[in-house]
Image: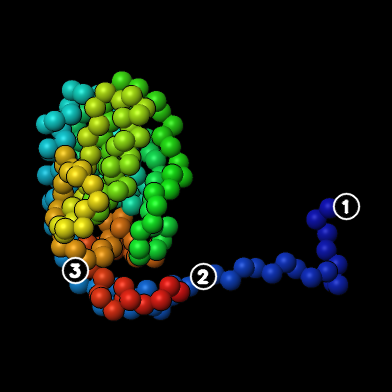
């Protein structure tokens, strides 16, 4: 008979509920807000209007770059005013770290890109390595045309690629950013705005 238990049988241990590291709360408290949530939402409004004007009749396939672009993609989808299809991919250089490495492909789009107009949506254009690699992949898959949209374009002279996004929400100086999909060591993607990490927190050891 299954489902019974005896007094001598030990019950399975329940896993400990993970707690938010105190270091992450401290990082959030020390960070500087560059753009409030209201400012970011207005920028996304403007992005959607520009995408509407350019791609309304192009039957585009939107490619969300996970995980960072999940929030901005969802918000753009709610604002765009034409029929479209959406897919996703996962290509990263960070893996919850604060320094980028080689581009690593984790997930490719499920839908065919052949002959399609593609709009790649990412959270940030920093050095350009990730976005240019994704654009090159789309071209190799024989898409008809590929556009790019980023919530944040970083302004600095460390670009590793000449790529420029077709649709940009906001420009930001060369800080490590979190919020609206961008993370700090895997946390703070949901922060209500876009924040710059304090310099001392970038020098801290990985926990």
Label 1: state its secondary structure: loop
Tell me if residue 205 comes above or below residue 172 in the rendering. Answer: below
Residue drawn 16% across and 35% down?
51
- The mark lying in front, picked from 3 and 2, is 3
Tell me if residue 90 comes above or below residue 194 in the rendering. Answer: above
Q: CA distance from mark 2 to mark 1?
A: 36 Å
Q: CA distance from mark 3 to mark 2?
A: 27 Å
When asked about the image quadrant of residue 28, the answer is: bottom left
Residue 38 visible in rendering: no
Q: Position of residue 42 (x, y in %)?
A: 13, 51
168 to the left or right of 24? left
Front-most of 204 and 158?
A: 158
- The mark lying in front, picked from 1 and 3, is 3
Residue ID for mark 1: 1
Give the numbered dot on residue 58. Answer: none
Give the numbered dot on residue 33. Answer: 3
> Could you tell me if the residues under marks 1 and 3 are in contact, i.e. CB atoms within 8 Å?
no
Neighbour tally class for label 1: few under 14, some 14-19, many 20 plus, Cα within 10 Å: few
Q: Earlier in the sequence, mark 2 or mark 1?
A: 1
107 to the left or right of 169? right
Residue drawn 39% across and 63% down?
97
Give the numbered dot on residue 18. Answer: 2
Label 2: state its secondary structure: loop
Residue drawn 26% across and 35% down?
119
Q: CA distance from mark 1 to mark 3?
A: 61 Å
Q: Earlier in the sequence, mark 3 or mark 2?
A: 2
Residue drawn 39% across and 40% down?
89
45 to the left or right of 187? left
Front-most of 27 and 141?
A: 141
């Amino acid at each position: 008979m299954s489902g019974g238990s005896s007094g001598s049988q030990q019950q399975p241990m329940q896993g400990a509920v993970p707690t938010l590291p105190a270091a992450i709360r401290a990082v959030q408290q020390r960070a500087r807000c560059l753009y409030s949530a209201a400012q970011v939402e207005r920028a996304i409004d403007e992005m959607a209007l520009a995408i509407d004007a350019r791609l309304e009749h192009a039957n585009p396939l939107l490619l969300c770059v996970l995980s960072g672009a999940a929030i901005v993609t969802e918000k753009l989808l709610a604002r765009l005013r034409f029929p479209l299809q959406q897919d996703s991919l996962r290509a990263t250089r960070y893996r919850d770290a604060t320094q980028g490495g080689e581009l690593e492909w984790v997930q490719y789009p499920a839908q065919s890109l052949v002959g399609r107009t593609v709009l790649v949506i990412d959270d940030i254009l920093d050095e350009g390595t990730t976005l240019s690699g994704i654009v090159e992949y789309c071209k190799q898959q024989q898409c008809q045309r590929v556009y790019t949209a980023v919530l944040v374009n970083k302004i600095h002279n460390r670009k590793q690629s000449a790529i420029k996004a077709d649709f940009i929400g906001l420009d930001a100086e060369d800080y490590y950013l979190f919020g609206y999909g961008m993370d700090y060591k895997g946390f703070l993607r949901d922060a209500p705005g876009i924040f710059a990490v304090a310099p001392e927190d970038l020098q801290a050891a990985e926990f």
